[in-house]
Amino acid sequence: MFGKIFSRNYSCSDTLEHLQSYLDGETDSKTARKVAAHLADCPNCTDELSLYQQIKVSLRAPKVEVDPQVLQALNDFGRRVAQSDAQS
Amino acid sequence: MVMLMPNKTETQEAFETHVLPHMEILYRTAWSLTRSDSDAQDLVQDTLLRAYRAIDRFDGRYPKAWLLTIMRNANINRVRKKKPDLIDNPEIAFERSTDFADMEDPEALVVDPMLSAAVEDSFSTLPDKYREVIELVDLNGLSYKEAADAIQVPVGTIMSRLHRGRNKIREQLGEGDVAAIGQGGH
Ligand SMILES: [Zn+2]
């Protein structure tokens, strides 16, 4: 998995170390180039990058409003599901 | 023989421990996926029933990620049944939009409906010092230097708090299918 086959410059662990700074645009250009070069060949690190991107964009997105009554109804349903076991 | 107290079974207890506390995330995620109150409720109920049937095989790690994987499968099933309006399905719309050309422009990235509620939830439970820095950088768009000036700490402190805080959120997303969805799933 975390092989070095494709990366003469940065290994996966080098890349992961700089991944968040890279995402934030806070690395120097040399580091950014090395990270980008590694990402181009490494699906694992690319997956990680997209998760951190999602963390960023999710936090910016507006929250879904939750109706407390709906939540209550779902909790009741959940408890009934849990109890179905005790009764069977 | 007389049963004095109806003891909770292990299954029941596991369900109460690992599933019921996450109801709000389940509902928020379901709503993001369906954009409808009634469909969201149906999807949560379906997810709960599936989780109940699967809980004996769950190892107790990353319950949110486990539940969201179940919800994702339940949703695929739901969409297949409903058809054919695939374009209106937020998850499919998301997968279509995922393109690394967008990398340079985070604003252009579409929120993954499977992850957003879980991210928000993990964020809200972080210790203040991490939340504060994530707020400055991710929500308010400050650079590390600007954030450092804002709360009068060294840039290195901003970086380590920010990265650690995000790592804590990342951990909650688990290793499984949900974590893979950012890449279009499988
Ligand atoms: Zn890698």
Image: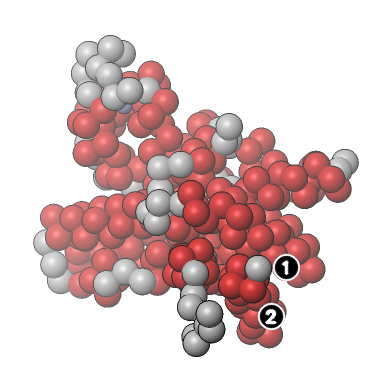
Q: Secondary structure at mark 2?
A: helix
Q: In the rendering, which numbered label is found on residue B41?
A: 1
Q: Tell which quarter ligand 1 is in.
A: top left
- Identity of the amino acid at label 2? Ala
Q: In the rendering, which numbered label is found on residue B18?
A: none
Q: Residue at x 77, y 49 (%)?
A: B78
Mark pair 2, 1: CA separation: 9 Å
Quadrant of residue B160 in the image? bottom left
Badges 2 and 1, same chain? no
Above or below, B5 relative to B80? below
**Label 2: few (<14), some (14–19) or many (≥20) C-alpha neighbours in 10 Å:** few
- Marked residue chain, label 1: B
Quadrant of residue A34 in the image? top left
Image location (x, y in percent) of residue B120: 46, 65
**Disc 2 to disc 1: CB gap under 8 Å:** yes
Image location (x, y in percent) of residue B75: 70, 50
Q: Is residue A74 left or right of residue B121?
A: right
- Identity of the amino acid at label 1? Gln
Q: Secondary structure at mark 1?
A: helix
Q: Residue at x 45, y 58 (%)?
A: B63
Q: Give whichever of A49, B176 is nearer the camera.
A: B176
